[in-house]
Amino acid sequence: MSAGDAMVVIGGGQSGARAVQVLREGGWEGAITLIADEAAQPYERPPLSKAVLLGERTPEQGAIHREAFYREQGVDLRSGCAVSAIDCAAHTATLANGETLAYRRLLIATGAEPRRMSVPGADLAGVHVLRNAGDALAIAGELGPGRRIAVVGAGFIGLEVAASAVQRGCEVVVLEAAPRALMRAVPAEVAQCLVDLHRERGVDVRFDVQVKRFEGEGRVNAVVPGDGTVVPCDAVVVGIGVSPRVALAQEAGLAIDNGIAVDPMLRTSDPDIYAAGDVCSFVHPLYGRRIRLECWRNAEDQARVAALNMLGHDEAHSAVPWFWSDQYDMTIQIAGLPAFGSTRAVRATGTASKVFFAFDEAGVLVGASGVGQTGEIARDVRIAQELIARRARIEPERLADSATKLKSLLAAGAH
Ligand SMILES: Cc1cc2nc3c(=O)[nH]c(=O)nc-3n(C[C@H](O)[C@H](O)[C@H](O)COP(=O)(O)OP(=O)(O)OC[C@H]3O[C@@H](n4cnc5c(N)ncnc54)[C@H](O)[C@@H]3O)c2cc1C
């Protein structure tokens, strides 16, 4: 077998680690190389902002595969090793150490990079972002009773960090530039439920706040917004979103459009190169426009589809997006893309649990967001996911009526 008979996967995160498994399960008997620039074995990121910050588990406990998996499956895992260039014409990937690997098919699963602030003091010690295990351990080391933590950004990462920090006994301030939380992700009503919860737990959540600079001698001791206030703090966590890691693909000449642009088969503009996970953008058949998702389920689903297509299948990626976040004892689960519609029905599903349904202008169900106890929302959100896949048109009143069993709508063939 020549080196050109190898499947090469760049990025040992959620998508990359899952893709190598699917390649093997899908019957590929040749070489598989997984190039991962992090030193640790591939691990799940969702626990980093939750159980790891709470000190309840280590990042290693979230390993995606058992340690023996890579050896047993004949996957050449190159940890601590970055790819520095791709030569599409030669079918090679060059590593930072100068080594060159030939591939038959290549998967780019390089994920996303946390955005950093470009204000004075942003590089002071004690100003953190959260993307990897090292970031999480560094932030966990900042948390403790009486510590003052400033979180910049009321997105999911910022709010999860705030919840964990408060539970560790910290005094937490969240500073958000927008007029409300989770602006791009969920309807205002859902965001408000979460903000209320944070305020009940003592988090000081402030909106319309532009951070102008961080202050401190070598180490941060205050955040200065533009409203004349000063927010003293012992550490800062910046959670203002991520950017897809496209540099490799861009330099290789692949098409980029808010991420590496892929077709429904997750193929890039080069037919032998695929992309999956946070790094790629694709046209979702349900929404008819190019989107990029930053969530665990999508990374898993796309890894499977991309790996099968690398093996010669012809499968289009069409899964309805699904996302969850845990804050305190509350869960939020989102099916579809609520931001592409407006909320027209709210369904009470338990003591303090609700599901919000969003419809587009044509009356098609496009998103459902459940907030509350997992056991009280998970089932309805799952059924909503199926209804969204069917482009169901349902009278909002029926969804809002908790006497209507959602399953009956499925059985009735809502469409
Ligand atoms: C703290 C945190 C909490 C989260 N919580 C949730 C949650 O509750 N629910 C949810 O749905 N989603 C959550 N997510 C999002 C989810 O984890 C991501 O969507 C998922 O990890 C994306 O997988 P990926 O494989 O695309 O990218 P990643 O998992 O980021 O993996 C990409 C990997 O590629 C590596 N890499 C990059 N460039 C190179 C290179 N040139 N050479 C070699 N390797 C390279 C990176 O270092 C990284 O290890 C969370 C994310 C974070 C950071």
Image (cartoon, grey):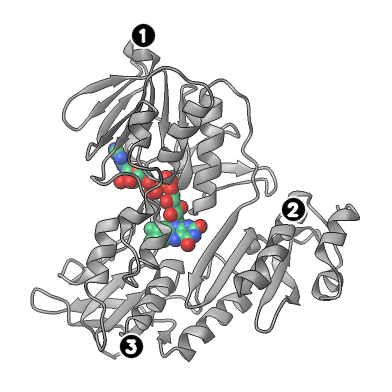
Q: Residue furthest left?
A: 217
Which residue in the protein does label 1 denote? 1
Q: Are marks 1 and 2 in contact (CB under 8 Å)?
A: no
* Mark identifier at residue 386: 2
Which residue corresponds to the image point at 81% horizontal and 64% vertical from the top-left?
Answer: 406
Compare residues 304 and 220 and report the one nearer the observer: 304
* Left or right: where 285 falls relative to 97: right
Which residue in the protein does label 3 denote? 227
Q: Is residue 189 above or below residue 38?
A: below
Marks 3/1: CA distance?
65 Å
* Left or right: where 339 falls relative to 70: right
Q: Residue furthest top?
A: 1
Compare residues 157 and 138 and report the one nearer the observer: 138
Q: Position of residue 381 (x, y in %)?
A: 69, 63
On the question of residue 257 being in view, the answer is no
Which image quadrant for residue 98? Answer: top left
Say which label, 3 or 2, has the lower sequence index.
3
Marks 1/2: CA distance?
44 Å
Which residue corresponds to the image point at 78% horizontal and 52% vertical from the top-left?
Answer: 391
Which residue corresponds to the image point at 41% horizontal and 67% vertical from the top-left?
Answer: 157
Which image quadrant for residue 55? Answer: bottom left
Residue type indicated by callout 1: Met
Locate the N terminus by quadrant: top left
Q: Position of residue 244 (x, y in %)?
A: 40, 48
Tag nearer the camera, 3 or 1: 1
